[in-house]
Image (cartoon, rainbow, N blue to C red):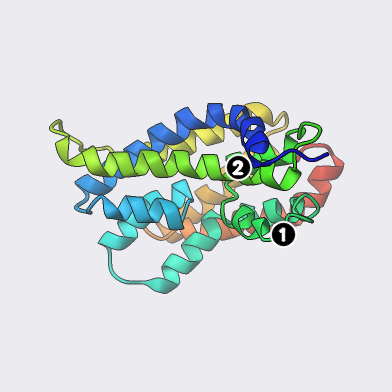
């Protein structure tokens, strides 16, 4: 017999506790960064609700401060979040039978929610759909809470915030190092480094980002099956 929603919430919550610290801190930093960049706290509040893509939200700050360029914004968003294509394919079977909850599960699927929902063993008697829903909702709330709090209290910051935007660079470095430690053969990481370096020399530091991400996406897509067969991916 399936248990109710509250039972699913209680089952999901322990899985999200480790995510809280990271999301709250990064969200807080993002909210402060938005505030010192000249934006009202409503911006990080609403953006964390509607975008819910941490790295993309940091990038959006520069986009909002720069010239209006929707085409660049579209392709940048596509490249930064292209990995969600593979996440979505992996979750097709798991999302079956979840009803309307599937719409929110698709919208709110970030790296951390995907990792939990894909690998967690749902306790017996707990509805799988509601379990995944609450994992996603809790992670979304952690990010929203941190971003909103940072936006509200950002105006109270009195120390020099120059260089605060480096948190995004630090975040990507940490993600890269984590992947490097997990991957035994480092083929994915080396591919990314080589292609990014080549694009940097070809296109220059102001224009290499999109070509590099496109090249990495294409290369990893082509190499996906050989890597899986070799046990690398």
Q: Which secondary structure lies at badge 1?
A: loop
> Please, is residue 156 above or below residue 213 in the view?
above
Drawn side of residue 111 relative to residue 146, left or right: right
> Please, is residue 80 above or below residue 172 in the view?
below
Q: Nearer the viewer, residue 95 or 186?
A: 95
| Residue 166 in sight in this render | no
Task: Identify the residue shown where x is 26% and y is 60%.
Answer: 65
Q: Are marks 2 and 1 in contact (CB under 8 Å)?
A: no
Q: Position of residue 36 (x, y in %)?
A: 20, 45
Classify the position of the C terminus by image quarter: top right
Q: Nearer the viewer, residue 170 or 205?
A: 170
Q: Position of residue 57 (x, y in %)?
A: 40, 52
| Mark 2 residue crowding within 10 angstroms, few (<14) / some (14–19) / many (20+) | many
Q: Nearer the viewer, residue 94 or 189?
A: 94
Distance from the alpha carbon under mark 2 to that under mark 1: 15 Å
Q: Position of residue 187 (x, y in %)?
A: 69, 39
Q: Which of the 4 image quadrants contains residue 88? A: bottom right
| Mark 1 residue crowding within 10 angstroms, few (<14) / some (14–19) / many (20+) | few
Q: Earlier in the sequence, mark 2 or mark 1?
A: 1
Given the current orientation, which residue lies at the most extreme left position? 158
Q: Which secondary structure lies at badge 2?
A: helix
Residue at image mark 1: 99
> Please, is residue 184 above or below residue 55 in the view?
above
Task: Identify the residue shown where x is 55% and y is 35%.
Answer: 176
Drawn side of residue 125 relative to residue 196, left or right: right
Task: Identify the residue shown where x is 81% and y is 32%.
Answer: 124
Q: Which of the 4 image quadrants contains residue 84? A: bottom right
> Please, is residue 13 above or below residue 117 in the view?
above
Check residue 134 in the rendering and tell me which mark sits there, or answer none.
2
| Residue 230 in sight in this render | yes
Check residue 49 in the rendering and tell me which mark sits there, or answer none.
none
Q: What is the count of numbered marks?
A: 2
């Amino acid at each position: 017999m399936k248990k109710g929603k509250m039972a699913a919430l209680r089952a999901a919550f322990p899985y999200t506790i480790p995510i809280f610290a990271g999301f709250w801190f990064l969200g807080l930093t993002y909210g402060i960064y938005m505030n010192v960049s000249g934006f009202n706290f409503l911006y990080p509040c609403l953006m964390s609700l509607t975008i819910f893509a941490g790295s993309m939200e940091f990038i959006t700050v520069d986009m909002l401060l720069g010239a209006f360029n929707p085409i660049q914004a579209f392709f940048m968003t596509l490249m930064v979040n292209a990995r969600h294509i593979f996440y979505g394919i992996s979750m097709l079977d798991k999302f079956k039978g979840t009803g309307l909850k599937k719409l929110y599960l698709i919208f709110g699927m970030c790296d951390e929610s995907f990792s939990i929902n894909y690998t967690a063993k749902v306790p017996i008697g707990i509805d799988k759909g509601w379990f995944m829903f609450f994992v996603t909702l809790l992670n979304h709330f952690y990010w929203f809470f941190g971003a909103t709090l940072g936006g509200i209290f950002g105006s109270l910051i009195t120390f020099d915030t120059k260089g605060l935007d480096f948190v995004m660079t630090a975040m990507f470095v940490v993600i890269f190092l984590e992947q490097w430690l997990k991957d035994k053969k480092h083929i994915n990481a080396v591919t990314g480094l080589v292609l990014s370096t080549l694009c940097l020399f070809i296109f220059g530091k102001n224009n290499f980002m999109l070509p590099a991400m496109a090249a990495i996406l294409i290369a990893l897509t082509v190499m996906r099956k050989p890597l899986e067969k070799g046990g690398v991916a």
